[in-house]
Amino acid sequence: MLPLLDAPLAIVDVETTGAHPAWDRVTEIAVVEVEGGEVVSEWSTLVNPGTTIPAAIQALTGISNEMVAGAPAFEDLAAELLERLEGRVLVAHNARFDYGFLRHEFERAGLRFQARTLCTVKLSRRLYPGHARHNLDSLIERHGLRCGARHRALGDAQAVWHFLRVAAEERGAERLEDAARQLAKLPALPAHIERATVDAIPDAPGVYLFYGERDTPLYVGKSVAMRSRVLQHFAADVDSPRELQIARELRRIEWQRTCGELGALLREAELVKRLLPVFNRQLRRANELCAFAFGSKGLQVVDADQINAETVPLLHGIFRSRRAALEALRELANEHKLCLQALGFERPRRGACFRHQIGRCAGVCAGRESVHAHQARAAAALARLKTAAWPWRGPIGVVERDAEREATDVHLVYHWCWLGTANTAAELAGLLESPPRARFDLDHYRILARHLGAGRAKVVELGAQPR
């Protein structure tokens, strides 16, 4: 008898049309039900995916479009499958893959499915740490496992069950039980990430970096509890297509600890722009920034090359793109009945503008309001977008302390530009003596304005401006 877990097991394998559970579909399912260390049922069925199976997948699995044409759709067998799975620990080789597909298919069928999972890839790594490869082909060869039909659902599920029995004989049932219990409580980590890698990440403030093949930056994140946040990416109930693709492509994790949340926010914004990771939602490029400013010719758009520490106090709003700026201006114009033609943002025409004809312009274009009165109203409306002036005489140090490590970070800031972070008095003196040339950064400006405006930051004025 195999004392794997007190709960009954459902050893599952699915074959699919591809690797993305959000849009690919299941073509075959197998469930081997185990109770008391003995197989009580084996069940498998082809599934009509409702879409074409790619030629490469047909060659791999041997499942053709003709074979599934007369098979039931998932929704037709969902109730029976759910009954087989309910109350059991779902065991699979790369459980994240199988569990993700099943959750999506049940959701499409209008059913909710949740289960504890046990990944035998992770179990193999824990029980056989001296081996480099733990895919199913490697396990079959290494342990001499029986597999009736590789890349068919029932054959692969039977091989997984055979692996559990062999592992119990080779490593002992008690050790297998302990390892399985621990893993069943942990997120199923991506295939190329060892548990020790995640365990080494401190549950403290900082940034973490995900890398793929050839060290391609995939994602940069920040948190006040890095390890917990990293594990959230791999939780079994995460079904975001982006998160699933990150997990599939992930090969390496780096992390950088900071003394507090502000340091993590500043570092994340800097790394996203420098590394341009694939999966960050917004690659925040500084050269696309623009703003509004009043000049000799009235209201004008100021491009990125004119936005710097000195001009920021003169600007009205800073936007990530010209399109975003014009959308904001149009909203203000609608709210305050301003004339975009008079402001120079619509082509001039004779007589009243179209917006006046539909009641969205007070009528400066039709002589119903003086130009000066309209400009005054425009200035008042835009005043709420005014960027904050630098309130200190020179640079400041924003202090964050990590009591656990007895460490201190001092973030050197001048005119809303982050010039660097120092951990010692000597490093701070070096930054003040030769500060890096900092280009204005909208994200840093917003982070710092919000953090300093809250009034909770410890600020040290550092006197004269840096050279």
Image (cartoon, rainbow, N blue to C red):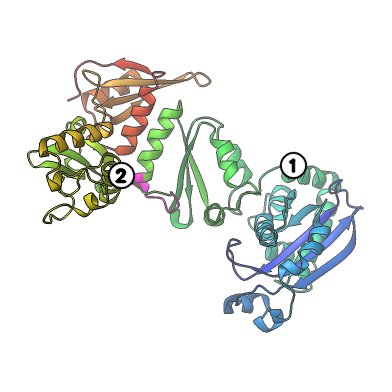
Residue depicted at x 25% and y 49%: 322
Position of residue 94 relative to residue 47, above or below, is above
Are the residues flagged by discs 1 and 2 in contact, CB closer than 8 Å?
no
The numbered disc on residue 331 is 2
Crowdedness of circle 1 by 10 Å Cα count: few (<14), some, many (20+)? few
Crowdedness of circle 2 by 10 Å Cα count: few (<14), some, many (20+)? few
Residue 338 spot, x, y in % from top left: 22, 42
- Residue 166 visible? The answer is no
In this figure, which residue is indicated by the disc labeled 1? 182
Residue depicted at x 25% and y 47%: 287
Position of residue 387 relative to residue 127, above or below, is above
Position of residue 420 relative to residue 213, above or below, is above
Total number of numbered discs in the rendering: 2
Residue 245 spot, x, y in % from top left: 54, 57
Position of residue 137 relative to residue 263, above or below, is below
Amino acid type, callout 2: Glu
Q: Is residue 461 magenta?
A: no
Residue 137 spot, x, y in % from top left: 69, 66
Amino acid type, callout 1: Gln
Q: Secondary structure at mark 2?
A: helix
User: In terms of depth relative to the viewer, which is nearer, 340 or 27?
Assistant: 340
Residue depicted at x 22% and y 32%: 380
Of tags 1 and 2, the one toward the viewer is 2
- Residue 95 visible? The answer is yes
Q: Is residue 424 left or right of residue 287?
A: right
Q: Is residue 274 magenta?
A: yes
Q: Which residues are magenta?
A: 273-280
Q: If you read the primary sequence from the N terminus, does the residue marked by circle 1 or circle 2 appear first?
A: 1
